[in-house]
Image (cartoon, coloured by chain):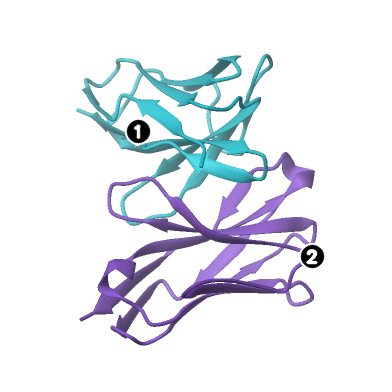
Chain colours: A cyan, B purple
Amino acid sequence: GAVVSQHPSWVICKSGTSVKIECRSLDFQATTMFWYRQFPKQSLMLMATSNEGSKATYEQGVEKDKFLINHASLTLSTLTVTSAHPEDSSFYICSAPDRDTQYFGPGTRLTVL
Amino acid sequence: GENVEQHPSTLSVQEGDSAVIKCTYSDSASNYFPWYKQELGKRPQLIIDIRSNVGEKKDQRIAVTLNKTAKHFSLHITETQPEDSAVYFCAARSYNQGGKLIFGQGTELSVKP
């Protein structure tokens, strides 16, 4: 199947700083990518849909100014968590569809101190 | 928008027994229903999926059934093995909503040797 990578796999940052997470489709092009957040023992909650060459679409309740998404190419989407706070600590996972199937990246564990 | 409900939240079975996980969805326009297996700290992995024009699909020990009228679908695992222990997520996708996946709450399956 198709491969999606994410970088970094884990990051620890201080409160108030910004963190950028990259999501790449390695062997296919993705005009759309999705960003999810997963808290411990919970489901994947869709945060936003990343659209190549246009603005991201955010789910209700997700602050677009706090979670900046850029989809500059057909293989790369980035999520920047701005002014991170401890409550932003979570597992962030991206996904990209190849034909009908959605493939997930390995996730990024963010810890905000 | 779409809402997916998944039951049970936890399921414990003896090795060799069958396991059944059920999901219901709300959006009649949803037409694609994947099931993902997620091991602790790892990415969700697609194990089987079904489209709305099919009532049942089987892949070795795993099967999925879909009842469009009742808007529910189920995952069946036969002859369970300890390595089947993981969290399982159902999801639904509607092309009316940009192709995004909406996930159920997850089922933690434990297979006891």
**Vertical position of residue A81 compared to residue A109: above or below:** above
Which amino acid type is marked by label 2? Answer: Asn
Residue drawn at point x = 30 percent, y = 17 percent? A16
Quarter holding the C terminus of chain A?
top left
Instruction: Check whether the beta carbons of the residues at disc 1 and disc 2 lie within 8 A of each other.
Output: no
Tell me residue B45's x, y (percent).
44, 51
Residue drawn at point x = 41 percent, y = 29 percent? A5
Q: Which mark is residue A88?
A: 1
Nearer the observer, disc 1 or disc 2? 2
Q: How many marks?
A: 2
Residue drawn at point x = 64 percent, y = 59 percent? B33
Marks 1 and 2 belong to one chain = no
Which amino acid type is marked by label 1? Answer: Asp
- Residue A91 is drawn in which quadrant? top left
User: Is residue A113 toward the left or the right of residue B1 in the image?
Assistant: left
**Vertical position of residue B87 compared to residue B12: above or below:** above
Q: Label 1's element?
A: helix
Q: Which mark is residue B12?
A: none
Kindly identify which residue carries mark 2: B53
Q: Can residue B22 be seen by looking at this rendering?
A: no
Tell me residue A18's x, y (percent).
34, 15
- Residue A46 is drawn in which quadrant? top right
Q: Label 2's element?
A: loop
**What's the distance in space between the residues labelled 1 and 2, CA to CA?**
40 Å
Residue drawn at point x = 45 percent, y = 25 percent? A23
Within 10 angstroms of label 1, few (less than 14), some, or many (20 or more) residues?
some
Residue nearest the viewer, comparing A46 with B93: B93
Tell me residue A26's x, y (percent).
48, 25
User: Is residue A50 toward the left or the right of residue A66 in the image?
Assistant: right
**Vertical position of residue A41 compared to residue A57: above or below:** below
Tell me residue A40's x, y (percent).
31, 51
Q: Chain of mark 1?
A: A
